[in-house]
Image (cartoon, rainbow, N blue to C red):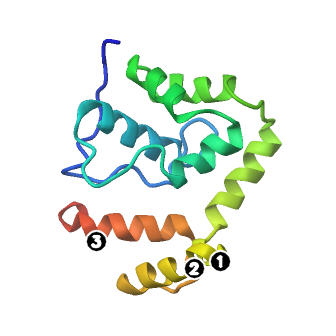
Amino acid sequence: MEQNVIGKDLTKEAPRSPKTRVGDYVILGRTLDKCRALLAGNIGEYHFDCPLDNMLFGWKGIVGNDFKAAVGGGKSDEEMAKWVDNHGQPKSQAEKAQWREEMLKSSLYNVPEKREFFVSETSKLGLDPETPTFDWLEADDRASYPQLVA
C-alpha cells in the first residue's frame, strides 16, 4: 500500500493531548499522531495501538490494524473521525458524550494492577497520585519536550 502520511515527528515533539477532540472523540487526535508517526518512521518513544489507543478502539469495537490501514491511505483528521463513526459498534451522540466525560475523569490510580506504576510516574512529575490519566500524559509530554512549553 502506498503511504500518503503527513504528520508530526514524534522524535522532536509530543503528539496532541489526549483531551484534544477530533470529531466527537477524545484520544483520537493523539492516536492519529502516533499512527502517522509510526507509518512515517518517526514515532520515537511513543507506541501506537497501546492501552490508551485501545480505550477508544475497544469502546468502538475497531481493530488497530484496520485503523492503521485507513490512516495509511492519507485520510485527514475529519475523514478519520468519520471512519471511526462508521466502523465498529455504532454509538449515539449521548453515548459519545458520556464516554468522553468518563475518559477525561478516569485515572490509572483506580486500576489496581496499574496503581503502583501510576503512583510512581505521577510522583516523578510532582502530581497527585489520583491525577486523571490525561492530565498525567500532558505533564509527561511537557517534561519530555520542555523546549515546546510556551
Identify the element where label 1 is drawn.
helix
Q: Which disc number belongs to residue 143?
A: 3
- Residue nearest the viewer, comparing 52 with 12: 52
Identify the element where label 2 is drawn.
helix
Q: Which circle, 3 or 1, is nearer the viewer?
A: 1
Q: Is residue 19 visible?
A: no
Mark 2 lies on residue: 115
Q: Is residue 128 left or right of residue 60?
A: left
Mark 1 lies on residue: 112
Q: Quadrant of the N terminus?
A: top left
Residue type for callout 3: Ala
Q: Are marks 2 and 3 in contact (CB under 8 Å)?
A: no
Q: How many marks?
A: 3
Residue type for callout 1: Pro
Q: Residue furthest front?
A: 113
Q: Are marks 3 and 1 in contact (CB under 8 Å)?
A: no
Query: Gap in Å between the C-alphas at discs 2 and 3?
Result: 21 Å
Q: Are marks 1 and 2 in contact (CB under 8 Å)?
A: yes
Q: Which disc number belongs to residue 125?
A: none
Q: Residues within 10 Å of mark 1 (few under 14, many from 20)?
A: few
- Residue nearest the viewer, comparing 44 with 149: 44
Locate residue 81: give its quadrant. top right
Image spot of residue 26 (x, y percent): 58, 48
Residue at 49% x, 54% y is 18
Q: Quadrant of the C terminus?
A: bottom left
Q: Is residue 49 visible?
A: yes
Residue type for callout 2: Arg
Label located before the other in sequence (2 or 3): 2
Q: Residues within 10 Å of mark 2 (few under 14, many from 20)?
A: some
Identify the element where label 3 is drawn.
helix
